[in-house]
Amino acid sequence: MKQRRMVAGGAFALTAALLVSACSGGSDSSGSSSEEVDTAPKGEGQTLTIWHYENDASAMGIAWEKAMEKFTAETGAKVDFQLKSFEQINTSASQVLNSDAAPDVMEYNKGNATSGLLSSQGLLTDLNGAVEAYGWEDKLAPSIQTTAKYSDLGVMGSGNYYGVPNYGEYVQVYYNKELFEENGLEVPTTLDEFTQVLEAFKAKGITPLAESATEYPLGQLLYQLALTKADRQWVTDYQTYTAPADFHDEAWTYAATTLKEWVDKGYISKDSTGLKAQDVGDAFIAEKYPIFFSGSWWYGTFTTDAKFDWGTFLFPEAKLSPGSSGNLWVVPENSDAKDLAYKFIDITMSPEIQNLLGNNGGIPVAAEESAIEDEKSKELIQNFNTLTEQDGLAFYPDWPAPTFYADLNSSLQELVNGTKSVDEALDQMQADYDKGIKEIAG
């Protein structure tokens, strides 16, 4: 794979860097109805600027690389691809997309706090016309469509299309099979058995859980623990404000209490307060931890980089788990190459790219089932299908409010390092959640 440029720096420097790092090319036009969408755009002499944050070795990185090659071959347009990190796009998207530095198409996180917020600010293009012209809706299951549509307030699940997902994702347990076998342990099927596995590793002097509190996945683990005490209506109320969320209810109280107990017992390192997601993913690859609870987006990286035998399983006894459609391809309103952007999105939905995605550890939404040959990929897709069949995709804990991702991580850092009690951490989460919801819904 070719080397890709990564933009780095702090929040202030990052914003400045992004503002000068990209500008869209071409004079391609587009409108809001299917009659105005050109599904066979000619791109000679034009450049499509694309941003995404997928690792070269990931299924999405592999698939999008091929999609860019196919796009150039079909349209004649050049591609200016710029690799960004999740945090870079997440922290400065509103500023960048409200400028001439906006790309023509980019990967962006789904949910009220991200794509919903940008759509309500008028920074994303209404894709209804393109969805109709290309027939994308027929390829997206209803549960996947949820994260692609947003109301005028930016609340997901209804309204217009502002993004197109072309893969699914969910959070699961990755485990080091060799370390399990060396310590006489089996895959747990109940939460009690899972706790016993954690205790067995700790008794051997091994910190079992790879966790980061500066970024995900600790917030996802907290949410997963809460989901073991929740139902679908609880998720709906929390995510779409149909009823007030109570962070001192049984679910959240159990989750925070259990998490604090796991820290106190040494199942989770207090050092997690200074670690990022990449740090702990790398540590799992280095066999420093036997268990990593995180997203399916790590699957391809582990397949490539882990030199030991590893496997996956769904969190024991959980009927609901963090998960949803994958991230969205969105088209910034300031793009002046919208028809080319739509064409690129359509190529990522083609059987060739979807099958490639599926055979490299991704979860395609429109692949040909018979074309998926890789055994690990089949396992990944089967776990996802298990969740979707039981209506088990519960989205993510930070989605309801624009700043809740950072707020949640901050509360968890204090819970882990002991500067806040369980009740105090839950109080802070409640205050941050309520503030964010008020900003959206009034």
Image: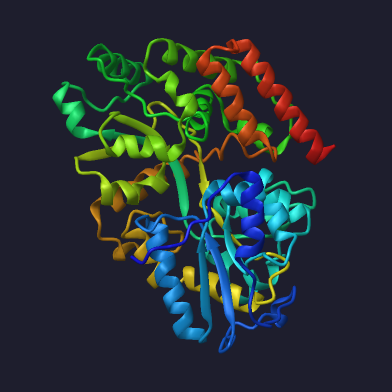
Residue 277 sits in which quadrant?
top left
Q: Residue, x 43% and y 78% (percent of image)? A: 70
Question: Which image quarter is the C terminus in?
Answer: top right
Residue 124 sits in which quadrant?
bottom right
354 horizontally vs 77: left or right: left
Q: How is the image coloured?
A: rainbow
Residue 86 location in percent, x, y?
53, 49
Residue furthest right in the image: 442
Q: Residue, x 36% and y 50% (percent of image)? A: 381
Q: Residue, x 53% and y 83% (percent of image)? A: 77
Can you say whether 29 is above or below 188 in the image?
below
Residue 302 location in percent, x, y?
30, 46
Residue 236 sits in which quadrant?
top right
Residue 170 location in percent, x, y?
45, 43
Can you say whether 199 is above or below 47 in the image?
above
Residue 72 location in percent, x, y?
47, 81
Can you say whether 260 is above or below 329 in the image?
above
175 horizontally vs 324: left or right: left
Residue in front for this viewpoint, 195 or 183: 183
